[in-house]
Amino acid sequence: MILDIIISGLISGSIYALLAIGFSLIFGVARIINIAHTAFYMVASYCIYFGTHKLGLHPIWGMMAAVILVTLFGLICYKLFIDPIREHEAAVLIGTIAMAIAMQEIMLLIFTGDYLSVPSLIGGYLKIFDVKVFYQQVLTFGMALLILAALWALLMKTRLGLAIRSTAEDREVANLMGMNESRVAMITMGISVGLAALTGAVIVPLTTLSPFMWMHPLIMMMAVVVLGGLGSIKGSFVGAYILGFAEAMVVFLAPMGAYLKGSVALSIMILVLLIRPEGLFGVAFEEER
Amino acid sequence: MGILGFYLRKLFNIVKREMLVLPSRIVVGLFFLVLLLLPVVTQDPYVLRILVLTSIFAILAASWDLLSGFTGQMNFGHALFFGVGAYTAALLNLHAHIPPWGSIPLGGLGAVLAGLIIGIPCLRLRGTYLALTTLAFPIILMGIVFAFSNITGGELGVSGLSRLSGSRLSDYYITVVVMLGLCTIMWKITDSNTGIIFHAIREDEVAVRAAGINTTRYKLLAFCLSGFFAGISGGLYAHFMRIAGPSTLEVSMSFTVVIWAIFGGIVTIYGPVGAVFILFPLLEFFRFWPEYRMLMFAVIVLLTLLYMPDGLFPWLRDKVETECPRCKIRNVATRKTCRVCTAPLD
């Protein structure tokens, strides 16, 4: 029981962390609330399904192709629909909502609403205290940590990371210092969508695919971002595991837990916000200029 | 007779001098007339049903605009008010046997209570934090609805409510008159002193506070007012469909309201109402290709936004009217001089 909670909490926590960091990156740099973020994750999962089942690719090639294709697709969507209306925040907001709905409907048309699944990369399991731990679960968790580490290195150790962080801090000054703001936004969008696609690739063997699978992660991702503090990567990381474990505990311990898991996790978020309105690790922003 | 004549003449003057001079006002007048006289032309139950639902959602979209458009407090969880209104009306009707004319306003009051409960903690948050937090509330309530399914009916919802009225035609008149009335009230509110303070809070909250106005109180007032109107629309929906189900609390419901309001143009009240009257029947029209329905909806919204990012109705209004540079009064675009101060327009 305890081990079940730990495994499920670690896995969903890592997934939320990956999604939330991608979401808060693009929010920080371009001030875009990208509702379609988890829709890209859904599209990536379907791409992998298509690659492995219909084209007969090896799952690893399928995943790589899916990540690249979805990143390109995300950049095209950004260039076509979001970039021309960047100045109108409200319009960007419903633009991304409409994009998410459109993707959901296209997937519904192509793959129908049936639940689909992708075989795991490696079979087998090991037993710890009579609890089966599938190798795929270990792999997913390891991959998630690896991606997070790579992202941290990218943001903290490279010039591009410096540009992203400084644009997030102050767009105008970063522009004055010679950073091409719109190009940084474009690159960040690419990284953010790429992260969503990678998340899809990592989690796809453990879940069932449906065109509506983006809704629940979307809500949890937003809760994580708010809980951890907008724009704080450490905050997203900690918040993701808090909510992931909260969900896992409710599912395994409370009666009717499956219905209440979202409610309890979101209530935790609201309780934290009551005490710290700027989130766990957020800095109280000054008035936006 | 003399008094009646006086008022008639006054009404005639208002219509002639204030309403017929601007195309947008003529359109609003025509909209009222067409809606009220439509049953003379057709009494097709299907058409009436669509218009009833459209009116109900028009109230909802306008109430979102009152809160999020005017005070700038982005609310992503507007379905909460709608759902609370629907469930309150449904449970009161089913268990306490309160007829619709009582249960719908009580549903509105229930939504006001919900507005207070979420407003008080949420008003410490700002901007994006607020938007993302409000998204959580309908989902929490949905979890509770599913967990206590012996009271709320779980997935099936509360069904078997009494009808709004005896016939489809009277249903139509009730909802349309309520819609026109409530939207006029909302528009009046936004035009009053309170409405000006709402505007100011959106533009610059610090400045409003510096002017000695308790902004928290006004934001809470906006939450309650918006909750009341949204709750009434929820109650109407429950009684018209005769069921209050968890679909009223879904995330997609909250998102649809946001889409309607922003598509029509926020900070206008008439924008969201008009947008619902365009988009909702359009969605019904697409039922001939059911699988492409939502896709077409999304594509239309995306393409419209590329050309009119401020919303459809402000764009249209700017095409047919210009603002006088001196006295800020609106004129028909064809005029050369302002109709009030005769300053040249360009």
Image (cartoon, rainbow, N blue to C red):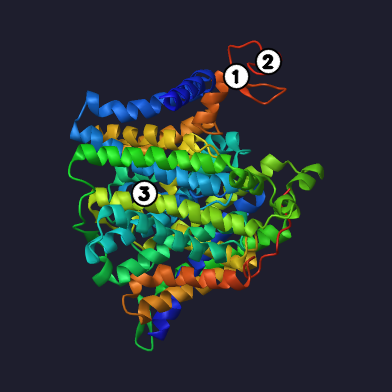
Q: Report helix, strand or loop for mark 2.
A: loop
Q: Report helix, strand or loop for mark 3.
A: helix
Numbered marks: total:
3
The span from disc 1 to disc 3 (Cα, nearest Å) is 35 Å
Q: Report helix, strand or loop for mark 1.
A: strand
Side of B209 relative to A11 (left or right): right
Side of A216 relative to B73 (left or right): left
Q: Earlier in the sequence, mark 2 or mark 1?
A: 1
Residue visible at 51% across and 53% down in the picture: B75
Question: Could you tell me which chain the residue with mark 1 belongs to?
Answer: B
Q: Earlier in the sequence, mark 2 or mark 3?
A: 3
Q: Amino acid at mark 1?
A: Asn
Residue A227 appears at what percent x and percent y? Answer: 57, 67
Q: Is residue A214 above or below residue A86?
A: below
Question: Could you tell me which chain the residue with mark 3 belongs to?
Answer: B
Residue behind mark 2: B345
Residue behind mark 3: B233
Residue behind mark 1: B331
Side of A117 relative to A69 (left or right): left
Q: Residue furthest bottom?
A: A129
Badge 2 and badge 3 in a common chain: yes
Q: Assess whether mark 1 and mark 2 are in contact (beta carbons under 8 angstroms).
A: yes
A52 or A266, nearer to the observer:
A266
Q: Earlier in the sequence, mark 1 or mark 3?
A: 3
- Structural crowding at the residue carrying mark 1, measured as other residues with C-alpha within 10 Å and reported as few (<14), some (14–19) or many (≥20): many
Residue B211 appears at what percent x and percent y? Answer: 74, 52
Quadrant where the N terminus of chain B lies?
A: top left
Residue B119 appears at what percent x and percent y? Answer: 53, 61
Is residue A112 among what the camera can see? Answer: yes
Is residue B83 among what the camera can see? Answer: no
